[in-house]
Image: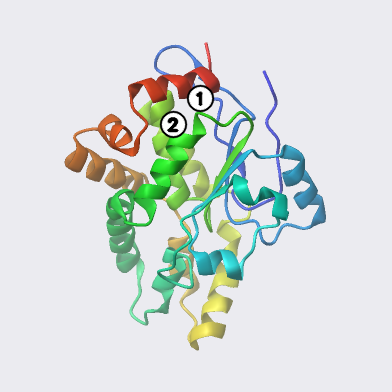
Amino acid sequence: MTTSHAVDVTNFRDFGGYATVDGGRVRRDRLYRSGQLHLAQQPEIEQLLGLDFSMIADLRYESERTNAPSPWPDAYFERIHAHGSDRSSDAPHVALLRSESVDNGAITKFYLHFYASLPFDRLYQPLFARILTNLGDTSGRFLVHCAAGKDRTGIIVGLIHHALGVSRADIFADYMRSLNAPGLAGQGPTIADEIERKHGRRPPLAVVEKLLEVEEVYLQTAFDAIEAKCGSLDAYLDEAGLDAAGRERLRERLVER
C-alpha cells in the first residue's frame, strides 16, 4: 500500500484508507484535505510541491485567497478550482466573531444554519458539482481546503466519501478528526488578536475555541438538509452531475478491490 505523506500544515491529512461498503478500501496518497496554506514555510512548501497535486479545490472566498495566498506557482493556475466570488472578507466562522453578542449558543446556531444551507448555496453548489465531476478524471493527487479545513472542506469530503462507498460511521470519524487537528486548536489566540486588530474588540478566548471545534450534529445537519430536499445523498450527487456511472468510475480510480 502506498504511504501517505505528512506535511506540517494546519489540519493537513490523507482522507483515504477507509473501508467501503462493498469490500474495497479507499486508496491512500490520493486524497488530501487541509486548512489554508499561507503560513507554510519553505520546507513545507517544498513538500507540498513535491506531492504535485493535479487538482486543488480552494473553497475560500476570493478575499480570503487574496489575504492569505497559497504558495502555488503560476503553472498551477489551471489545477485550482474555486468559485471566485466574495461574501465576506473573513472566513465564515471568523466573520461571526465581529458581533459583540456572540456566545456559544450563537455559534451552535450559526453552524447549524451554515451546514444546512451550504450544499445549496449559489456559490458552493456549482463549485461542489465541478469538484465532484472532475475528480473522477484526475489521475494524480487531489487536495481540498478552506480556511480551517473543517467546515466547507468537511462537507465536500463527506460527499466524496459517500460517493466512494465509505460507511456513514467512518465519514463522521474522519470529520471529527478535525477536533484535535494539528495547528487548529491553537489558533484561538491568533484569531482573537486579529479580530481585535480589525474591529477594536477582543472576543472571549473560550468563544473562539468553541468556533474552532466540530460536532457530529453539524455534518449530520448538512446530510439531513440534502436528504430532505433531494431525497438522498445519491440524488444530490446525481444533480451535481456525478451519477451512478460517474460514481462507479470514481470508485474504479480511487478504491482498491
The residue identified by callout 2 is 161
Residue drawn 61% across and 45% down? Answer: 79
The residue identified by callout 1 is 18
Residue drawn 33% across and 27% down? Answer: 243
Q: Position of residue 106 (x, y in %)?
A: 31, 68
> Seen from this angle, which residue lies furthest bottom?
200
- Camera-nearest residue between 135 and 92: 135
Position of 138 relative to 151 (above/below): above
Disc number placed over residue 102 in the picture, else none = none
Within the image, what quadrant is residue 224 found in? top left
- Camera-nearest residue between 209 and 127: 127
Within the image, what quadrant is residue 246 found in? top left
Within the image, what quadrant is residue 56 found in? top right
In the visual, does 152 lie left or right of 34? left
Position of 63 relative to 246 (above/below): below
User: Pointer 2 and pointer 1: residues touching (CB < 8 Å)?
Assistant: yes
Q: Amino acid at mark 1?
A: Tyr
Position of 16 relative to 196 (above/below): above
**Quadrant the N terminus occupies:** top right
In the visual, does 71 lie left or right of 89? right
Q: Position of residue 162 (x, y in %)?
A: 38, 30
The colour scheme of the drawn protein is rainbow
